[in-house]
């Protein structure tokens, strides 16, 4: 079923798409029907720039275990970077839409 | 029934129609050649988008003698590959129910305006399209039959409601005004068998005309030959039920 479970985050970051880097302005995190992953539902991460049209995106579709591992890895790396004094302070607040 | 010495011809092309708020949106249309009359069918596409599978079934309905139209319910989300556009809509939590219904009503009115329609129009949808088809026949006058294939979120708890989907379709069941065919897989996670049962109880309670079929060893999307969810026997049987139902009511 379409779960419509989704969070949108406004960001100002960077991603490399099919041909080149582009400015990411929104991130969607959903748990819903994937397009490629062989599951009925997947944890889908889409980094997009809505102003550049639907093709401006990179996407990942993960099973729940891989998604949890990725989330834990992200937080662990950030914690290590913070402990080492390396963390950049982004001038732009991340907004949850 | 077709015989091999008969003439067959189909017109199939992209067209436009006036949908929600009189917006012009695009649609894929297919009908048998000739003066008809033909019954009409509106196709409400699924979450994966206005995609090749929906092109194919628009053509399939035309092959079976229907004037079929599949409006692009994601038109306002921009253009690109169907998948790119559907990702955007998925990220937005779907399209608003009122908007989808406005577009489906526009498709209904377009078919009814055509000189080759026999006066009967049905609606068919799978996945989110099944849900939209159900909503459409509860909230729009003028449909003569409805087919809901595994539409999830017809039964919705308060915690499931969203700004785009503020009312559970089940709440509108009292206004269902035409016969309904429902096809569901027993292994589907949404709608679950319990939700299908709840839907059926409400239809029975309100004395509605319906036929529900539940398929063992099938989950969500068992018609989709291009996905792992495809179940050949169940899909063949399901399509036979679709056309038998439409022949009865359209």
Image (tube, rainbow, N blue to C red):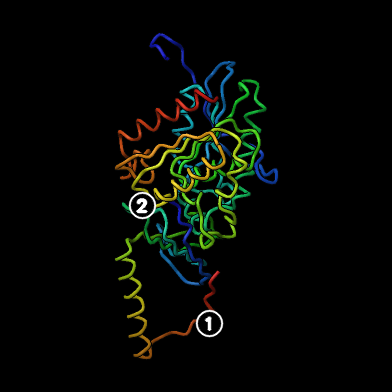
Label 2 is found on which chain of the structure?
A: A
Residue B116: give x, y in percent of width and height.
61, 20
The answer to which of marks 1 and 2 sits earlier in the sequence is 2
For the N terminus of chain B, the quadrant is top left
Label 1 is found on which chain of the structure?
A: A
| Residue at position x 44%, y 30% in the image | B242
- Left of B165 or right of it: where is B63? left
What residue is pinned by disc 2? A40
Residue extending furthest front? B205
Residue extending furthest top? B5
| Residue at position x 42%, y 14% in the image | B2
Distance between the alpha carbons at the discs numbered 1 and 2: 39 Å
Residue B191: give x, y in percent of width and height.
43, 49
Mark toward the viewer: 1 or 2: 2
For the C terminus of chain B, the quadrant is top right
Residue B11: give x, y in percent of width and height.
53, 24
Q: Is residue B246 above or below residue A32?
A: above
């Amino acid at each position: 079923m379409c779960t419509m479970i989704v969070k949108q985050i406004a960001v100002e970051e960077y991603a490399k798409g099919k041909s080149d880097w582009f400015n990411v302005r929104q991130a969607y995190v959903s748990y819903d029907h994937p397009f490629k992953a062989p599951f009925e539902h997947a944890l889908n991460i889409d980094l997009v720039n809505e102003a550049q049209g639907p093709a401006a995106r990179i996407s990942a579709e993960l099973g729940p275990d891989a998604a949890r591992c990725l989330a834990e890895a992200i937080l662990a790396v950030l914690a290590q970077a913070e402990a080492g004094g390396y963390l950049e302070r982004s001038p732009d607040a991340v907004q949850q839409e | 029934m077709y015989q091999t010495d008969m003439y067959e011809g189909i017109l199939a092309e992209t067209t436009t129609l006036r949908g929600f708020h009189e917006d012009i949106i695009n649609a894929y249309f297919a009908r048998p050649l000739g003066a008809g009359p033909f019954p009409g069918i509106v196709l409400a596409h699924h979450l994966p988008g206005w995609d090749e599978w929906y092109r194919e079934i628009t053509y399939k309905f035309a092959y079976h003698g229907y004037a079929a139209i599949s409006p692009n319910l994601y038109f306002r989300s921009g253009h690109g590959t169907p998948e790119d556009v559907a990702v955007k809509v998925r990220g937005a939590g779907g399209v608003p129910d009122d908007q989808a219904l406005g577009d489906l009503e526009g498709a209904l009115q377009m078919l009814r305006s055509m000189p080759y329609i026999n006066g009967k129009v049905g609606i068919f949808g799978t996945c989110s399209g099944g849900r939209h088809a159900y909503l459409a026949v509860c909230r729009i006058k003028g449909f003569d039959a409805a087919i809901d294939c595994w539409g999830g979120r017809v039964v919705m708890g308060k915690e499931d409601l969203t700004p785009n989907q503020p009312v559970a379709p089940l709440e509108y069941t009292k206004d269902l005004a035409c016969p309904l065919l429902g096809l569901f897989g027993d292994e589907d996670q949404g709608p679950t068998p319990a939700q299908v049962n709840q839907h059926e109880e409400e239809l029975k309670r309100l004395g509605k005309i319906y036929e529900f079929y539940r398929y063992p060893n099938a989950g969500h999307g068992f018609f989709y030959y291009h996905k792992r969810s495809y179940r050949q026997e169940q899909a063949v049987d399901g399509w036979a039920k679709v056309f038998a139902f439409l022949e009865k009511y359209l």
